[in-house]
Image (cartoon, helix red, strand yellow):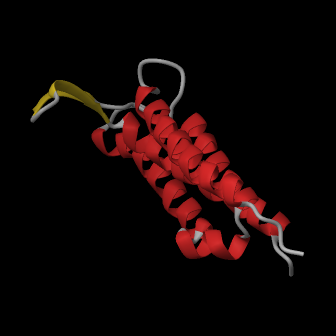
Amino acid sequence: MKTNDVILQTTTKLIFFIIFLFSIHIFFAGHYTPGGGFVGGLLTASGIVLLLLAFDLKTVTTALPINYTVMTAVGLLLAIATAAGSIFFNVPFFTHAFDYFELPLLGKQSLHTAMLFDTGVYLVVVGVTMTIIQSIGADD
C-alpha cells in the first residue's frame, strides 16, 4: 500500500528552502559571529536529509544531480589552496588578507580570503555528510 505523503512533501519543499537560506546566512555571518562554513554545511546537509526523508533517494538525486564525492574533493582543494596561498606571499601559513571595497547596492564592504576557505569547508562538510547518508541509505 502506497502512503499519501502530500502534506509531508509539500511542507518539506518549503522548509528545505528556509533551512537552505538560513545556512547561507550562517555561512556569511561566520566572519563576525558564530557560524561559518562548517555550521552552514551541516545545515545544508540537514535540509537535503529532510528531502530524503520526505521523498526517495532516486527523486532527490534527480532533482539535485550532485556528485558529492567531487564536491568534497573540490572543497578540500579550495580550502588547502586558500590556506597554503599565504606561502606564495611570504607570510605565515593560514594568514588571510582582507580589504574594503565599494560594491554596488551594498556600499563599503570588507572582503576576506577567509571566505574562500569557508567555502571549501562548506563544500567538504556537505559532500562528506551526504556521501555518508547516501551510502547508509542505499539499497545495494
- Residue 66 visible somewhere in the drawing: no
- Residue 24 visible somewhere in the drawing: yes
Q: Residue furthest right?
A: 1
Q: What residue is shown at x 90% (from left), y 75% (from top)?
A: 1
> Horizontal placement of 103 versus 119: left or right?
left
Q: What residue is shown at x 41% (from left), y 45% (from top)?
A: 82
Find residue 128 and report its image quarter. bottom right
Q: Is residue 99 above or below residue 133?
A: above
Disc tally is 0
Q: What residue is shown at x 77% (from left), y 64% (from top)?
A: 4
| Pick the front one: 38 or 93 | 38
| Pick the front one: 21 or 13 | 13
Q: Position of residue 123 (x, y in %)?
A: 53, 53
Q: Quarter holding the C terminus?
A: bottom right
Q: Is residue 67 above or below residue 129?
A: below
Q: Position of residue 132 (x, y in %)?
A: 76, 60
Q: Position of residue 121 (x, y in %)?
A: 54, 45
| Pick the front one: 114 or 96 | 114
Q: Position of residue 136 (x, y in %)?
A: 84, 64
Q: Residue furthest top?
A: 33
Q: Is residue 122 above or below residue 71?
A: above
Q: What residue is shown at x 75% (from left), y 57% (from top)?
A: 53
> Horizontal placement of 95 versus 120: left or right?
left
Q: Is residue 71 above or below residue 91?
A: below
> Horizontal placement of 104 versus 7: left or right?
left
